[in-house]
Image (cartoon, rainbow, N blue to C red):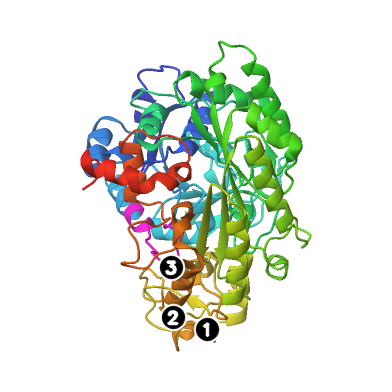
Amino acid sequence: MNNALHQALDKPDSRGLVTLVNPNKVHPPIAPYALDVLTTALEEAGFTVEVVDLTFRRDDWGRCLTDYFARRQPMLVGITVRNTDTVYAFEQRPFVGEHKEIITAIRGLTPAPVAAGGIGFSTMPYALVEYLGVDFGVKGPGERILCDLADALATGRDPGTVTGLLRSTPEGVELTSPKPVPGTVALPLVIPNSVGTWQVDGVSSYVRRSGDPTKVDNAEYYRRGGLAGILTKNGCAYRCAHCVEPNAKGGRVGKRDISAVVDEMQSLAEQGILDQHTTDSEFNLSVAHAKNLLREIVRRRRDSANALNDLRLWVYCQPSPFDEELAGLLAEAGCLGVNVGSDHIRADLLSKWKITGGGSTYYTFADTERLVRLCHENGILTMVEALFGMPGETHETMRECVEAFMALDATVTGFSLGLRLFPHIPLGIEMAEKCDGVRTMPGLQSNTAKGPIILKPRSQCASMAEYERQFMFDEDGDFRLVCYFSPDLLEDVGTNTDPNGRWARSVQLLWDLVDPSDYHRVMLPTLAGMSDFDNNYADNPFLTSLSGLGYTGAFWSHWRDREAIMRKAQLTGVVQ
């Protein structure tokens, strides 16, 4: 029996110990939901699972790791990479450098192989297997692939038989393709840039725990972050030009069993975790499934003793489909807020941007107006988001959008400017093809660019890792997070062609377009010194004040009261 089996002392019949590490040190803390999903799957497969969560040990994470691995030697270590960076065009703060430091420390403490995954990792998995120095990678949902990998390690089977696994080899990062075995069911097709619905466990109810020091402590995250995530379906069938999710999570929707999802929600509510936010790409992607799930919540709420009667649900939605029935069911199920990614009013921009797999648009601004009206009629708060800076954006199109969105009178309206480019989103692919390895394109920008940003299409790169790497690192290996701002925005001379220019005039225009009397209900991009508030999540003083003062729910629902909240936080010493 190997050492990892000996150390699973609490489960003598365990197949081995798998340690899952959360390296995310950003606050306010967001529970690593993926580790609950993986824990559920691995335990069902007979493995002992322990979680080492560094979110609450960010000041002494090294000691935490040293103490843990001094007494535990797992057979496999898994690392979740939720975000590669802030994905905020005006900050561009990378996280993977910190993750690499943590992984390097782990490699020095245990001989166990290390596998990485997560939504952020999945945006550029080949490059990150190389950069992070891990043995294995999983793109997309990892529950089935990681269980298969753990089985291979426990039985001595070649990891090269694990379908969908990325492996670090002397020849580079390789994807394991299915190998037909006589007499067995054919395995799904795996291609280098695909994520399949077969990777999703749609049947199990993911186990959510609190108070167990070897697992994700969901109650502690709720106490210090104010929300819990809940996944009802995975993947997205749309092909929006700016979005990573169809590529990173899967281009088809993998729906979870409704009873399993609601069982999970009820379990969280029974632990006192009442504010639950969907983590689907969009809750109404498969609207029939969404309605049936809400009906099951409503059915259980008819029992006055059921903890779901205290549920406070928050959801992400697209403007369509959204009808009277959906709005009514949301209200009956305890939904307090809907965050809608409407993004723009101009049909000519949306027709090249927010599209289905077949290339057609799937909503109009009238759908956004209807959603906001139906939500307000049902007592549901709304946040409507606009994204400026896509190709074709001008100051005039920004003006039209701001005027229309402000007229909606949503609870909060968020305006963002600029887009983080990733290697497998449609706009990232388009920019690489237009650069063709020989020229830069107006609008390509990075705060740390040392010279023109010249991207190469995949066909000119020696490997997938090389193609992905250029969106995060420059030729010297230094961080260079590539972003995009429409070159048609009227800026100071040279800004639109400067690789590290700042679109300052466009930011100021946004502030000028909003009446100061409405500032309390809008989120606006900021430059240094413009405002005490911005809509960047990472270590945001307002958001950490919310959690420190005990507020719960979607942070935007408290945005209108932010000045009073900040004053209270300063008076009570929550923030300096």
Labels 2 and 1: the sequence-earlier one: 1
Q: Which of the marked residues, 3 or 2, is nearer the chain's N terminus?
A: 3
| Element class at badge 3 | loop
Q: Which of marks 3 and 2 is in front?
A: 2
**What residue range appears in magenta?**
84-99
Q: Which mark is residue 413?
A: none
Which x, y percent locates residue 551? 38, 35
Depth order, front residue of 81/31: 31
Q: Mark 1 points at which residue?
A: 440
Q: Indicate yes or no whether the magenta region holds residue 89.
A: yes
Identify which residue is drawn at 43% across, 60% down. Answer: 130
Residue 119 on image: x %, y %? 52, 49
Does dot 2 land on a helix, a strand or a loop?
loop
When asked about the image quadrant of residue 477, the answer is: bottom left
Q: Is 293 on the left or on the right of 541, as rendered?
A: right
Residue of label 2? 499
Residue type at numbered disc 2: Pro
Main SS, magenta residues: loop
